[in-house]
Image (spheres, grey):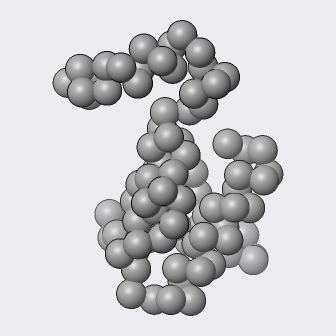
Amino acid sequence: MLAAQLGPRLAQLRAQPAEFGPLLERFQLVDDTGNHRFDVCLFRREDGPVFRAGTADLVATFSQSAISECDDEELAAALEVALLDYRRSGAA
């Protein structure tokens, strides 16, 4: 079902994987002491949910690489910085 819904995107990804990058990315965000704090799942490197580590508790959503649906401004700013750091690390 997912393949049918994403048909054109999957075709692009298969034809030019380097140009269209990963379709889905899942990664963990850790705090300064290395403790796993959040789980992130991004579609096309810019849209997706942020969950409290190991749970289904939604804490924020990335939409076009910016945080939305987050009531905590300090957390929102930290999550945006964390996404930039993740991308710069080359892990993506």
Residue 66 spot, x, y in % from top left: 51, 66
Task: Work out which quarter of the rendered image holds the C terminus and state it.
Answer: top right
Q: Is residue 23 above or below residue 87?
A: above
Image: 72 above or below 29 = below
35 left or right, relative to 66: right
Could you say which quadrant of the image residue 49 lies in? bottom left
Is residue 4 shown left or right of residue 57?
Answer: left
Which quarter shows the N terminus? top left
* Residue drawn at 40 percent across, 65 percent down: 61
| Residue 39 in view | no
The residue at 53%/59% (across/down) is 65
Name the one closer to the observer, 25 or 57.
25
Going 48% across and 56% down the picture, which residue do you hit? 64
Return the residue found at the far left.
Answer: 1
> In this picture, is 80 found above or below 43?
below
Q: Residue furthest right?
A: 89
Q: Total number of numbered labels?
A: 0
What is the x, y in percent for residue 57?
33, 70
Residue 44 position, x and y percent, is: 50, 40
In this view, which residue lies farthest toward the top? 15
- State the image coordinates of residue 78 (x, y, percent, origin top left): 62, 78
Image position of 90 (left or right of 45): right
